[in-house]
């Protein structure tokens, strides 16, 4: 079995960034195209939601009430109540986004296997795996993200607790821990879907792989997530509280930093993560597939007295 040490982690990351940069033009065109398709699907879903509200929620007054509730939640974000409301509203809207991300893993697989891909490839995966990728994305959302919003909603609205100080810090730590744990365990679902597994089988395989190869799987998940947080730190806390970002510190203001870091995230970091995780998935799957044969061969040798 291939060891899940720092060396293999470094190889995964190196290959991820190397091929993300090498195929940046194809990835750029693919991401632009899939973003357009995603927006189109989002509009269709939004129109469908509005139609349902108008039909069963009292017409335009019902639509206005729903919009006001969502608008109030956005204005009070990140209050506990707003997190729950926004999370529940996002469930149907995140579907095409997850499909787009999953289709990117299809391109990542092509890059890992052949060191190249085409911009058209993402649309092939988008079409072929739409239902499976959507199912995987919704499952990830329901397990990793939705419980956080519902948990805060329950604590604040049902129990009436207002967390401050140490209690707030512990709640935030618990939420971050939950997201890191569940996100890591489910981080191989998209590569498994691309590999031809059903949503159920991809879930089982991803969780099993995360448990058996925790250092390899979680190191990639935490590295890329942490890098994204570090890059966006000036936008979250301001350049004064994020002195490690040289651009923001040198200019004394954010300037073009949000644009630069967003482009880097969209066209380099996310594709690199998909490539790294796809590579790790393929290698780990190959090792696991070989294990039964290796053990069977060893048992035969022991039976024949060839192994002491």
Image (tube, rainbow, N blue to C red):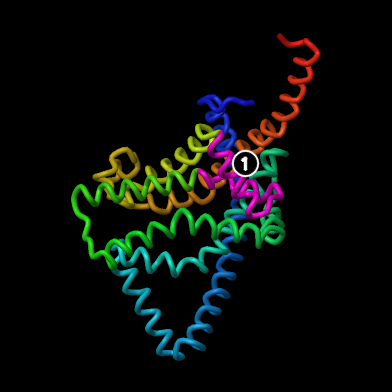
Indicate the quadrant containing the N terminus: top left, top right, bottom left or bottom right: top right
Name of the residue lying farthest toward the right: 304
Under tag 1, what secondary structure? helix
**Residue toward you, 246 or 7:** 7
Please tell me whether residue 236 belongs to the stretch shown in magenta: no
Side of 59 where 1 appears, left or right: right
Q: Where is residue 88 shown, x and y percent of the image?
A: 43, 68
Q: Residue at x 77, y 10 (%)?
A: 306
- Which of the 4 image quadrants contains residue 76? bottom left
Q: Is residue 29 visible?
A: no
Side of 269 where 229 appears, left or right: left
Q: Residue at x 46, y 38 (%)?
A: 223
- Which of the 4 image quadrants contains residue 148? bottom left
Question: Is 43 drawn above or below residue 4 in the view shown?
Answer: below
Q: Main secondary structure of the magenta part?
A: helix
Q: Which residue is mark 1?
A: 278
Q: Where is residue 89 shown, x and y percent of the image?
A: 44, 70
Q: Residue at x 56, y 34 (%)?
A: 212
Name of the residue lying farthest toward the front: 303
Q: Residue at x 58, y 25 (%)?
A: 3
Give the extent of the magenta segment: 185-212
Q: Is residue 203 visible?
A: yes
Please tell me whether residue 193 belongs to the stretch shown in magenta: yes
Q: Crowdedness of circle 1 by 10 Å Cα count: few (<14), some, many (20+)? A: many
Q: Where is residue 118 shown, x and y percent of the image?
A: 70, 50
């Amino acid at each position: 079995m291939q060891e899940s040490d720092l060396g293999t982690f470094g190889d995964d990351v190196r290959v991820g960034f190397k091929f993300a940069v090498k195929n940046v033009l194809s990835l750029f065109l693919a991401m632009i195209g899939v973003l357009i398709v995603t927006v189109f699907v989002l509009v269709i879903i939004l129109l469908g939601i509005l139609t349902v509200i108008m039909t069963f929620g009292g017409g335009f007054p019902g639509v206005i009430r729903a919009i006001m509730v969502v608008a109030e939640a956005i204005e009070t974000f990140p209050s506990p109540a707003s997190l729950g409301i926004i999370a529940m509203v996002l469930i149907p809207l995140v579907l095409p986004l997850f499909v787009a991300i999953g289709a990117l893993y299809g391109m990542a697989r092509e890059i890992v296997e052949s060191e190249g891909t085409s911009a058209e490839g993402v649309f092939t995966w988008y079409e072929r795996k739409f239902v499976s990728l959507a199912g995987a994305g919704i499952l990830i959302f329901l397990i990793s993200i939705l419980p956080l919003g519902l948990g805060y909603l329950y604590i604040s609205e049902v129990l009436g607790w207002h967390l401050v100080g140490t209690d707030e810090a512990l709640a935030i730590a618990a939420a971050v821990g939950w997201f890191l744990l569940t996100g890591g365990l489910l981080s191989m679902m998209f590569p498994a879907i691309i590999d031809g597994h059903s949503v159920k089988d991809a879930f089982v395989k991803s969780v099993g792989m995360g448990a058996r190869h925790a250092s390899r799987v979680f190191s990639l998940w935490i590295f890329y997530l942490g890098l994204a947080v570090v890059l966006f730190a000036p936008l979250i806390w301001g350049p004064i509280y994020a002195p490690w970002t040289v651009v923001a510190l040198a200019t004394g203001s954010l300037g073009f930093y949000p644009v630069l870091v967003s482009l880097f995230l969209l066209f380099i970091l996310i594709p690199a993560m998909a490539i790294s995780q796809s590579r790790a998935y393929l290698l780990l799957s190959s090792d696991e597939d070989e294990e039964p044969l290796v053990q069977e061969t060893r048992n035969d040798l022991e039976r024949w007295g060839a192994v002491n």
